[in-house]
Image: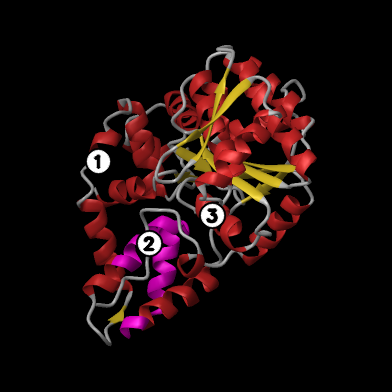
């Protein structure tokens, strides 16, 4: 049976990864130089897959690495737990021998004076780093300090990627957490950090505001959509495995409608590969059919839409129907019976919630964080 080459529901690397040669070259260079990177992009553009691809296929095999997602954390203890698991996995690396890992415990323990190191006997054994103190912001500082000292002593180099780093802003006592992290990271030894986030304004305010602890603690890297021509060539190559062809006009339409969103384009490509017969040609009309099928079968869109106030719902409709441009046109506001002041307030709130954002190349154009919501609203 021919395996579908497209993946839309998980991180990918290797043959499932498309493009981004320039991004990879720049990020690998920063990692090898021990420089921190602040990488921001809207969700579903493939930040996590890019990190996975770099970690698996573009770094020295002896470099320690860990990828930590803190999107779900809601307090300092949970943040510590996420960081300790990531660092523990990094320390054990690819070693699977229980004897070798057990012999490492006392060595690792000598660098982590504020924690007890033990070995977790799971199908994938790794270290456990249990703090002696339950003051978790301090424990985070001690955890990182111990890790950096271990790296320096063993002449090892490492990279730590932290996804959705801006989540720290919403945590209780976030100021204290930022101070502790800043102090530890600024004294790091042989380690680079990649801080990623989908809330661009939040993330950049952490690193660009002079009164914030993380001020100028890294290089900015904006991750845009995969180049259209590169993406089209990659899609063509993979569809050819089933002798299916997609016209450039059809792909350009898909790319524009989804604003180049990696996940959505992979999803539509997956459906095409599953449903089209050998030697079929996919044109613009067929792409419209697939998009309509996805949008109309996504019952969560209406539920999500109804979480907004009536004024915000009208604002979202205006953004959708106008293509995100000239949204303050008097005729448009009159059509929806909304006053300019209320509309401006709704747009500001929607930006703050992350429901919409402004195009980096055109700050006067508003786009949907969830491209499917925009498509659904345009279909009403």
**Residue mark closest to the camera, 3 vs 1:** 3
Q: Main secondary structure of the magenta part?
A: helix
Q: In the rendered view, would you say 167 is above or below 274? A: above
Q: How far apart are marks 2 and 1 (CA)?
A: 21 Å
Residue ID at (66%, 59%): 59
Return the residue at label 1: 300
Residue 273 is situated, as x and y percent measured from the top left of the image, at 29, 73
Q: In the rendered view, would you say 252 is above or below 137? A: below
Badge 3 or badge 2: first in the primary sequence: 2
Residue ID at (59%, 31%): 202
Determine if residue 246 is in view.
no
Badge 1: residue crowd in 10 Å (few <14, some 14–19, many ≥20): few
- In the image shown, does 103 or 268 lie closer to the viewer? 103
Badge 3 or badge 1: first in the primary sequence: 3
Which stretch appears magenta?
241-270
Residue 376 is situated, as x and y percent measured from the top left of the image, at 28, 49
């Amino acid at each position: 049976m021919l395996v579908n080459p497209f993946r839309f529901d998980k991180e990918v690397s290797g043959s499932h990864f498309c493009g981004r040669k320039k991004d990879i070259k720049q990020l690998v260079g920063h990692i090898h130089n021990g420089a921190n990177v602040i990488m921001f992009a809207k969700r579903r553009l493939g930040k996590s897959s890019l990190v996975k691809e770099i970690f698996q296929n573009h770094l020295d095999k002896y470099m320690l690495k860990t990828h930590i997602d803190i999107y779900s954390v809601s307090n300092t203890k949970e943040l510590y737990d996420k960081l300790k698991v990531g660092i523990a996995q990094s320390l054990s690396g690819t070693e699977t021998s229980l004897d070798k890992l057990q012999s490492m415990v006392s060595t690792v323990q000598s660098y982590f004076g504020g924690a007890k190191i033990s070995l977790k006997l799971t199908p994938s054994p790794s270290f456990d780093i249990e703090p002696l103190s339950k003051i978790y912001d301090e424990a985070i500082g001690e955890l990182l300090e111990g890790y950096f000292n271990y790296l320096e002593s063993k002449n090892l180099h490492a990279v730590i990627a932290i996804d959705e780093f801006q989540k720290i802003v919403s945590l209780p006592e976030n100021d204290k957490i930022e101070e502790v992290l800043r102090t530890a990271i600024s004294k790091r030894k042989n380690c680079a950090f990649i801080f990623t986030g989908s809330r661009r304004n939040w993330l950049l305010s952490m690193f660009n505001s002079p009164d914030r602890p993380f001020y100028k603690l890294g290089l900015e890297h904006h991750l845009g959509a995969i180049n259209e021509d590169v993406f089209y060539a990659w899609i063509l190559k993979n569809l050819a495995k089933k002798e299916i062809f997609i016209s450039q006009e059809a792909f350009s339409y898909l790319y524009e409608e989804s604003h180049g969103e990696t996940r959505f384009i992979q999803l539509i490509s997956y459906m095409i590969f599953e449903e089209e017969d050998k030697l079929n040609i996919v044109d613009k009309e067929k792409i419209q059919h697939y998009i309509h099928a996805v949008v109309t079968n996504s019952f969560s869109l209406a539920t999500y839409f109804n979480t907004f106030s009536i004024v915000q719902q009208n604002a979202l409709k205006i953004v959708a129907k106008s293509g995100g441009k000239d949204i303050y046109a008097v005729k448009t506001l009159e059509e929806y019976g909304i006053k300019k002041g209320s509309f401006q307030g709704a747009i500001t709130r929607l930006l703050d919630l992350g429901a919409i954002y402004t195009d980096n190349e055109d700050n006067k154009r508003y786009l949907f964080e969830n491209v499917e919501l925009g498509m659904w609203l345009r279909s009403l």
